Image (spheres, grey):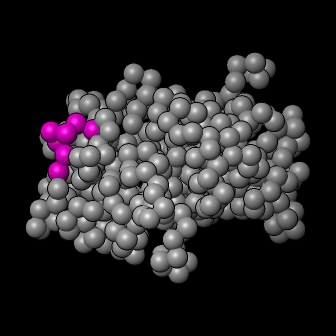
C-alpha cells in the first residue's frame, strides 16, 4: 500500500484540531495520511478532487515525528548483549514496550561482548519495519569492543579489543559480518582506527566516537575520515580542558569538512549529565543535539528533561529526538519529519509533552488508557 494504485485507493485520514511540527515550527494545520505516508492535501483536492474518508479530532494536541532512539541497550528485563537462542523475542518485547514512550524506530545496542555473542546475536536482529507489533528496527548499534580501557565504563575489560594490522578484516572477524549493523562506536585513538572509519563509512555505516581518551586533533581526524556522531557526550571521554578540549571540542571545531554536521548523543535523564552540561552543549551546537536514553530513562522523559534543562523551544526538544537522529542515519526524507511523502510515523503529545498516542505508517499502535473510547 506504499505506492502506485494501491496507495491511491487507500483511505485518506485527516487528523484535525492539532498543531503539527513541520519545518521547525508548530503549525495549526491538519495532518493528512494515506497508504502509510504523509499526504499533500492540495494535490488531493486539486488533482484527485478527493476529500478525507475519515477525520480524527486530536483535541488540540501536538503531532510530532515519531522518536528515534539510536542507542538502547535493552530494557523491561531484556539485555540485547545476552546471547540466547531467541534474541528476537527480547527485541520484539522492547520494540512493543517503547511505543508508549513515542519511539517509532530504534537501534538495538550491544555493549562490548565476546566474539561468540556477536556471532550469535547479530544475525537474529534484522532490520524490520514498525507496526502494531512494535517500533521499527533500523539496524544494530555496536558500542565496542574497540574502545579505550581507561574509559570503558561498564564495558567488560576482558573483551575489549584493539585493531590488528589488517584492521577492517579484524572488524569483520570480530562481529561476524555487518549486514544488520547501522552504527559502530569506537575510540579513534586506537591504531588503524582511521582506515576502519573510512571502510565502515563507505558501507553506509555511521561511525560514532566514544569511550575514548582521544585529544581534539585525533577526533578531528576521525571526522575528516567520516565519523559523524559522538556517543553520550561528556560521559566516558576526557573532560573538557582549555588546552585540549578532547572530543567535546568537536562542537566548536573549525577543522571539520565543509558542510559536515557532527551529531552528539546525551543522556538527558537528569542523572548522567548535569543540566549545565546540557545547556553548554545545546547552546554551542544546537543543530547536532540528539537526545538519547542510554540509561533506564525512557525517551519521552529525556525529551522533557532536555526541554527543562536547556530552556530550548518545544520544537527544538522534539526535533532532537526525531529529525536529528534521522539526519544522522540519512533517513530524513522518510523519518523524523512530517513533510509530504514521509512515512506517517508520529506521536501525539499534550502540552507537557506526555505521550497520548503513537502511530506508525498512519496506524494507531499505542494509546493512553484514558484516551480510549
Whether residue 249 sits left or right of residue 360 in the image: it is: left
Q: Please check the rendered image and state whether residue 132 is part of the magenta-colored stretch, yes or no.
A: no
On the rendered structure, is 124 left or right of 241? left
Query: What residue is rendered at 26% in x and 31% in y?
Result: 82
Residue drawn at x 85%, y 65% is 42
Q: How many marks?
A: 0
Position of residue 38 relative to residue 243, above or below, is: above
* Residue 130 in view in this figure: no
Q: Quadrant of residue 369?
A: top right
Q: Nearer the viewer, residue 240 or 349?
A: 240
Residue 162, how many percent across, how many down? Answer: 17, 56
Q: Residue 141 placed where, x, y %?
A: 37, 49
Which residue is at 56% across, 51% downward? 290
Q: Is residue 163 above or below residue 348?
A: below
Residue situated in front as seen by the camera: 66 or 74: 74
Furthest residue toward front: 243
Q: Is residue 27 above or below residue 356?
A: below
- Can residue 290 be seen at all in this image of the molecule? yes
Residue 92: x and y, percent? 42, 32
Q: Residue 126 at x, y = what percent?
A: 35, 47
Residue sitting at x 77%, y 33%:
352
Highlighted magenta segment, given as a residue range: 155-161
Left or right placement of residue 158 versus residue 256 in this view? left
Amino acid at each position: 500500500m506504499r505506492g502506485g494504485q494501491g496507495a491511491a485507493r487507500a483511505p485518506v485520514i485527516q487528523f484535525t484540531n492539532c498543531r503539527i511540527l513541520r519545518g521547525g515550527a508548530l503549525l495549526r494545520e491538519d495532518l493528512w495520511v494515506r497508504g502509510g505516508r504523509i499526504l499533500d492535501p492540495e494535490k488531493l483536492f486539486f488533482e484527485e478532487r478527493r476529500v478525507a474518508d475519515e477525520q480524527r479530532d486530536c483535541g488540540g494536541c501536538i503531532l510530532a515525528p515519531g522518536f528515534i532512539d539510536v542507542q538502547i541497550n535493552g530494557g523491561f528485563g531484556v539485555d540485547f548483549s545476552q546471547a540466547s537462542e531467541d534474541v528476537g523475542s527480547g527485541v520484539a518485547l522492547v520494540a512493543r514496550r517503547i511505543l508508549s514512550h513515542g519511539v517509532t524506530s530504534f537501534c538495538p545496542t550491544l555493549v562490548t561482548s565476546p566474539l561468540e555473542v556477536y556471532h550469535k546475536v547479530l544475525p537474529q536482529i534484522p532490520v524490520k519495519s514498525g507496526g502494531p507489533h512494535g517500533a521499527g528496527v533500523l539496524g544494530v548499534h555496536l558500542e565496542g569492543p574497540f574502545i579505550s580501557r581507561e574509559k570503558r565504563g561498564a564495558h567488560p575489560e576482558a573483551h575489549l579489543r584493539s585493531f590488528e594490522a589488517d584492521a577492517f578484516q579484524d572488524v569483520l572477524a570480530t562481529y561476524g559480518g555487518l549486514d544488520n549493523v547501522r552504527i559502530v562506536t569506537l575510540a579513534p585513538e586506537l591504531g588503524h582506527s582511521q582506515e576502519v572509519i573510512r571502510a565502515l563509512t563507505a558501507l553506509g555505516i555511521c561511525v560514532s566516537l566514544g569511550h575514548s581518551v582521544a585529544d581534539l586533533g585525533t577526533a578531528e581526524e576521525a571526522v575528516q575520515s567520516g565519523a559523524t556522531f559522538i556517543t553520550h557526550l561528556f560521559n566516558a571521554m576526557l573532560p573538557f580542558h582549555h588546552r585540549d578540549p578532547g572530543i567535546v571540542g568537536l562542537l566548536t571545531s573549525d577543522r571539520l569538512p565543509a558542510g559536515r554536521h557532527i551529531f552528539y548523543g546525551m543522556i538527558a535523564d537528569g542523572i548522567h549529565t548535569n543540566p549545565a552540561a546540557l545547556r553548554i552543549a545545546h547552546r554551542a551546537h544546537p543543530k547536532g543535539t540528539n537526545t538519547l536514553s542510554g540509561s533506564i530513562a525512557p525517551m519521552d522523559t529525556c525529551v522533557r528533561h532536555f526541554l527543562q534543562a536547556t530552556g530550548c523551544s518545544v520544537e527544538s526538544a522534539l526535533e532532537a529526538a526525531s529529525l536529528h537522529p534521522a539526519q544522522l542515519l540519512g533517513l530524513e526524507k522518510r523519518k523524523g519529519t512530517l513533510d509530504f511523502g514521509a512515512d506517517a510515523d508520529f506521536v501525539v503529545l499534550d502540552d507537557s509533552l506526555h505521550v497520548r498516542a503513537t502511530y506508525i505508517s498512519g496506524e494507531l499502535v499505542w494509546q493512553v488508557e484514558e484516551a480510549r473510547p
